[in-house]
Image (cartoon, helix red, strand yellow):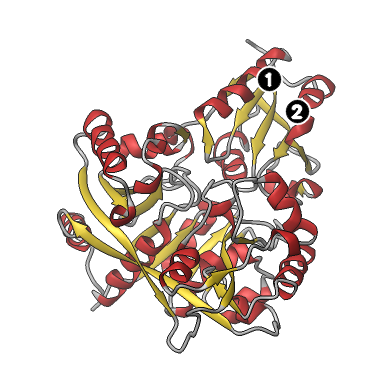
Amino acid sequence: MGKQLRCIILGAAGRDFHDFQTFFRDRSEYEVVAFTAAQIPFIEQRSFPRELAGPLYDSDIPIFLESELPDLIRRLAVDMAFFSYSDLSHLEVMHKASIVQSHGAGFAMLGPHLTQLRSSRPVIAVTAVRTGAGKSPISQALARHLTTAGHRVAVLRHPMPYGNLLKQRVVRYASEADLLTHECTIEEREEYEPYVAAGMAVYAGVDYAAILAEAEKASDVILWDGGNNDYPFVQPDLSIVVLDALRAGHEVAYYPGETNFRAADVLVLNKVSNASVEGLATLRHNVAAFNPRATVIESDLAIALAEGSAIAGKRVVVVEDGPTLTHGGMAYGAGTIAARAAQAQIVEPRAFAVGSIAEAYSNFPHLSAVVPALGYSEAQRADLENTLRASRAEVIIDASPARLDRLMSLPLPIARVSYCFEQRSGPPLFELVDEALHRWNAKPRE
């Protein structure tokens, strides 16, 4: 074409920044004139720093709300819009493509060959086909297994850079002090806290080439713990993908979850004990039709209340993982299951919700008897705390890994709910990983 293409990246403070760093940053034939923000609140109030943008950029790159996209295409003379975030239905993605094209610009998505980094260490990736499929418990179980076997494991987490992007270029979280120093949101804590509590370090941030280089210095195995249903930023040597038996059919209906599904080496059909016969039949049919070469295992998430928790017959307010409920589309999670099992009386919290929590019920009408653990800012965290205080419950059930008891001073007792990976059928997952590492000659620490 001969001209520099003016581009806009549609993102959500994760893959968008990675795509820029790996594909656009040093290519003079493209000029990224803006990012747009979706899914994550408040990120449109920032900009992508010039210091991270490279020598082709002499100023910060602005971030706008995605709702402004049609006007931005016109006002910024955009030639191409690149879609760079996850967990949208195929229909929603094509609606966005149609919006872009109806205003004259092209629409594209970058693939793994253009954006994935290569590691000098073997890489095990755990991803999913939807947010809330149960990926994190499997990632954490694998990390414990590998560490117990004597491997030096570096956990790379899909990015959640919701603070100062320059300060979050490369971050290593290894202690509670690190979580406080970096002012982690509730959403970040939900992912980092379990590793930190187990004595493991998690690497995350904005510049994943630099993050990977730091992680490789301290490890002989890289474990990629994915976010939402995005595909890995680092090329995996073993791709483990989690399917949700309670949302059968979603594995071929959401982007880029279907990418993960079709490329997987190991497929984990999770939550099978609570699934319908029809749902399991749909999963197995789709596996046979779209990825018959994959090894298939089935599993559950074992749910447990913390010792000493007394909730039987009590009025309880249930707090569940935020992203699982919002863009993950789930109506309930482990906390609700634990409350029902104990025959607790679940309080309907909508009437007591305030601020951004009340807005969440309006934006996600499928929610009812649960409180989403939203805390992307201090104000949103305060809204969550005030909602719980007003709930008139006797006990708070906390099914968020973020540990609300460490973040808030609440007048009610908190019963923590945990959930862990339990395999039901198929070749043992840990043995599959061990065999893969043996093939790669990854040597345990002497």
The residue furthest top is 1
Q: Can residue 41 be seen here? A: no
Q: Residue at x 40, y 47 (%)?
A: 128
**Residue 42, image x, y percentages:** 76, 51
From the viewer's perspective, tell me whether residue 94 is left or right of residue 236: right
Name the residue type under label 1: Ile
Q: Residue at x 68, y 57 (%)?
A: 162
| Element type at mark 1 | helix
Residue highlighted by disc 2? 69
Q: Which mark is residue 99?
A: 1
Q: Is residue 349 above or below residue 85?
A: below
**Residue 85, image x, y percentages:** 57, 39
The residue furthest bottom is 308
Q: Nearer the viewer, residue 318 or 86?
A: 318
The residue furthest right is 75
Neighbourhood count class around disc 2 (C-alpha, 10 Å): few under 14, some 14–19, many 20 upward: many
Neighbourhood count class around disc 1 (C-alpha, 10 Å): few under 14, some 14–19, many 20 upward: some
Q: Are marks 1 and 2 in contact (CB under 8 Å)?
A: yes
**Residue 325, image x, y percentages:** 56, 53
Find residue 432 and report its image quarter: bottom left
From the viewer's perspective, tell me whether residue 381 is left or right of residue 152: right
Q: Is residue 34 above or below residue 169?
A: above
Of the image marks 1 and 2, the number of the one nearer the N terminus:
2
Q: Residue at x 73, y 75 (%)?
A: 389
Query: Which part of the image, by quadrant, shows the N terminus?
Result: top right
